[in-house]
Amino acid sequence: MTKHGGLTWRVAVAILLGASVLLSAPALAARVEAADANPVAGLKDANVAFDITAGDAGRVLNILNTIDETRESFIKQGITPHFVLAFRGPATLLTQTDVSRLKPEERETASKVAAKLKELRGAAGIERLDQCSIAMRGQKVDKAQVNPDVTIVENGWITLVGYQAKGYAYIAP
């Protein structure tokens, strides 16, 4: 191998490539920031249907908080959010009021989920909180146990198809 100044040409190339990556990092960060802002440029409304299926109370609380942060961010950017939160599968247990069906260690977080649902139900940009009745049957949740801030729908998949057909973006967090 040919050496130049004590370095092999491969080491020299690796150093040059590493330096170019480091020097271009600010430019990459600016491009990421621009790419994040650019897709919503000129947008007046943000129609989104969130398909929430997680059964862990902490995960659902995190999802709800992130949805709320996203809603607030759209509003700050002058974009009107139109959000639908659809609950299915194991998430069904977290839209009910009977915490005795949850693991003892999840009950405190489940009460935070219930409080967040109440908060979201009254928040600007939240159109609906939907609970699939098929999932209720699968999780053995009685209609009387469903949080009053949540609307029971016959079939969550049909509801999600309807929203997508109306131009709502589908997000499955």
Image: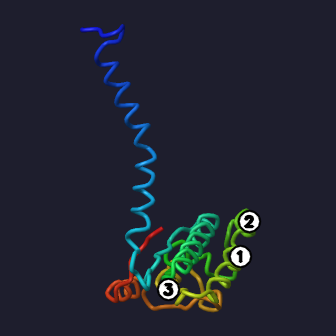
For marks 2 and 3, the one nearer the N-term is 3
Please name which of the two marks, 3 or 1, marks the residue nearer to the observer. Answer: 3
* Residue 133 pos. (x, y %): 49, 87
**Mark 3 burial class by Cα count in 10 Å: few <14, some 14-19, many 20+:** some
Q: Are marks 2 and 1 in contact (CB under 8 Å)?
A: no
Q: Are marks 2 and 3 in contact (CB under 8 Å)?
A: no
Asked which quadrant contains residue 121, the reply is: bottom right
Q: From the image, tell me which residue sits under label 1.
A: 99
For marks 2 and 1, the one nearer the N-term is 1
Q: Please, what secondary structure does the residue beneath circle 1 have?
A: helix
Measured in 3D between alpha carbons, the distance from the residue under mark 2 to the one under mark 1, in whole angstroms, is: 8 Å
**What amino acid does circle 1 point to?**
Val
For marks 3 and 1, the one nearer the N-term is 3
User: In the picture provided, is 49 more to the left or to the right than 119?
Assistant: left
**What amino acid does circle 2 point to?**
Pro
> Residue 104 shows which numbered tag?
2
> Residue 80 shows which numbered tag?
3
- The N terminus: image quadrant: top left
Measured in 3D between alpha carbons, the distance from the residue under mark 2 to the one under mark 3, in whole angstroms, is: 39 Å
Q: Residue at x 48, y 67 (%)?
A: 173
